[in-house]
Image: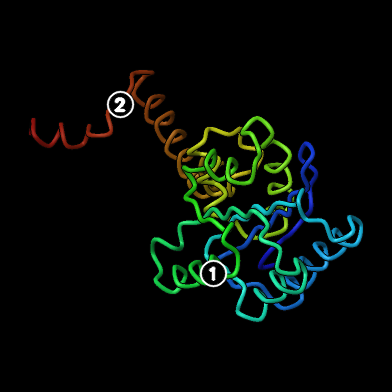
Amino acid sequence: MKMGAQLVAVGGLHVGIWLHTGSDPSTEEWTASCRNVSEFAKRNGGDFSRFRAFMVTDGGTPDALQRKELFRDALGGYPARMSVITEAVVTSALKRGIATALTWMNPNFRVFEPSDLPLALDHIGIELARFDSIWESLASMQASMEQNATLRRIGARNRIAPSIPAPKVMSERPRSSGVLRAAKAERSESRETDRDSAGGQPVSENSDTGRARKA
């Protein structure tokens, strides 16, 4: 999966949550997320005053047709408040250009860095204390996707409990391989044998060298 999307109730608001990898979303994935928005519009008589959007991306962005599908078709041109957290606009001129184009389509579209989580939430009218449900939604989507670096930085820089597991190579302490353990056991047995042959006295690994020097 290149992206995930859910609609979550937070207080009196309904928040569309998107999680993107570094790859741009497929047509099927993006259309499914826009369908959620359209269904929300039907249930609420086209009223988007309580709708918000919160997006986290490692760089994946919708193309021109997909942007039109969300902003024009699903939202009907309504300037919903949207916060996007990413670092891609800092490292990519292309992504900065896309972000600028999105602000032209929606003046309430804003981009923030992972350390700016409180500002991103404030922009969509949500208190930091109510972020738990959004975080859990992101964590559930992350479970079926490749590790999202931006999401982990949000947790680290804002000291959020790590409900999103780290990759095993990072979270587990390295263990000795079977070959290494066998080598250690063989060395230990060898030392025991040398100790027995010396009448119970420990023998230095450099004992041969010592004898040679005395000679």
**Amino acid type at image mark 2:** Val
Residue at screen point 53% across, 56% down: 110
Q: Would you say 74 lies left or right of 25 here? A: right
Of 68 and 177, which appears nearest the observer? 68
Residue bearing mark 2: 203
Query: Marks 2 and 1, Cα distance to the nearest angstrom?
Result: 80 Å
Provide residue 124's location: percent of width, then percent of height. Answer: 63, 46
Task: Tell me which colouring the rendered structure shows.
Answer: rainbow
Q: Residue at x 51, y 36 (%)?
A: 158
**In screen coordinates, is 84 left or right of 45?**
left
Count residues near mark 1 (Cα–Cα under 10 Å), then give few for <14, some for 14-19, many for 20+: few
In front here: 156 or 39? 39
Q: Quadrant of residue 37?
A: bottom right
Q: Residue at x 78, y 55 (%)?
A: 48
SS at circle 1: helix
Mark drawn on residue 104: 1
- Outermost top residue: 200
